[in-house]
Image (spheres, helix red, strand yellow):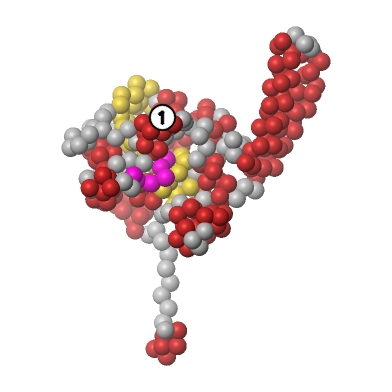
Amino acid sequence: MLDFEKPIIEIEEEIEKLKNISISGSSSLENVQPEIEKLEKKLRQTIREIFVNISPWQRVQIARHPQRPHSLDYINLLFSDFIELHGDRKFGDDAAIITGLAKLKGKPLIIIGHQKGRNTKENLKYNFGCANPEGYRKALRIMKLGKKFKLPIVIFIDTPGAFPGIEAEERGQAEAIAVNIREMFSISVPIIVFVIGEGGSGGALGIGIGDKIAILENAYYSVISPEGCAAILWRNKDKVDEAAKALKFTAEDLLKLEIVDEIISEPIGGAHRNFEEISARIGKAIDRYLNELSSLSKNELLRKRYEKFRKMGKWEEIQVSSHKLQATG
């Protein structure tokens, strides 16, 4: 439970108590139903009031919510005949990145996604969604499989960042991510990317080059976490709220900056409140993107992908006299 969700949880608990009273026979459903309906109305109103004006830092907390749907949840809800593929054929298998073959409405495609856990055991298994170099090399191996067999690729991003441990650096973490970024510009099949939770730095970008990039309403995509930014700029962990605002990493900010193509709206209260609804919205977006991209030739696809990333970022040139430069140091 997030701090700002407490009023919602309290009302939900009251509703559950009244339902249990009717089930136990202490009181009939007819007697408690008016109160249940009243509380349900209050619940909907409270959720709207809380989630209409949440801050960037609160969105980060929602993106990290332990009950938020992860890649495997979307795979199970959206696709059929999923066959997971393992290993990078060089070192080993990395559970933090899931890869495999699946079908969407009978059409085969490649699925790649970061995976997190919901408890300590699962988080240790998936390394909290922080991939090692073998995870990125596995992802690239499967992408090349998609290219070979002309299968579109759907990617789910949800990571605080690539694993920063010394063993990952020894096995070439930066090189693995850099190679993926380079090679993804030559994968001549449609690549559709969804940022479903956290989009942390190179850990996200290592599987984040796509023809279409969509982000869920409460997800974020950033070069650094708010905690990391606060520690570097202010040397104060309590400045996370200020850092989150300054980083401009929310879905709305990213759409304005043309980093993403679309915001996928979430159910009121966040994706963790309705897995089926958010999955259906993502499924519709995949259908739409595939129909749009299927009309492009290989050369057009690759050219547009390259141009999409080349135009990211804005700058301004100014001329400053030598006198002014001297004055400002």
Above or below residue 293? Residue 244 is: below
Residue at point 54% right, 35% down?
Answer: 271
| Quadrant position of the N terminus in the picture | top right
Q: Nearer the viewer, residue 150 or 260?
A: 260
- Picture coordinates of residue 301 (x, y %)? 31, 46
Residue 179 in sight here: no
Residue at point 64% right, 42% down?
Answer: 4
What's the magenta region?
158-163
Q: Is residue 3 left or right of residue 32?
A: left
| The stretch drawn in magenta includes residue 107 | no
Q: Nearer the viewer, residue 90 or 253?
A: 90
Above or below residue 182? Residue 265 is: above
Tag 1's secondary structure? helix
When asked about the image quadrant of residue 109, the answer is top left
In this view, the residue farthest toward the left is 90
Residue at point 48% right, 52% down?
Answer: 227
Q: Nearer the viewer, residue 329 or 283?
A: 329
Q: Residues within 10 Å of mark 1 (few under 14, many from 20)?
A: few
Residue 20 in sight here: yes
Q: According to the image, label 1 marks what residue?
A: 122
Q: Is residue 53 left or right of residue 41?
A: left
In this view, the residue farthest toward the top is 25
| Quadrant position of the C terminus in the picture | bottom left
Predominant SS along the magenta part: loop
- Picture coordinates of residue 195 (x, y %)? 44, 42
Residue at point 28% right, 39% down?
Answer: 135
In this view, the residue farthest toward the bottom is 323
How many labels sit on residues? Answer: 1
When asked about the image quadrant of residue 47, the answer is top right
Q: Amino acid at mark 1?
A: Glu
- Picture coordinates of residue 219 (x, y %)? 50, 44
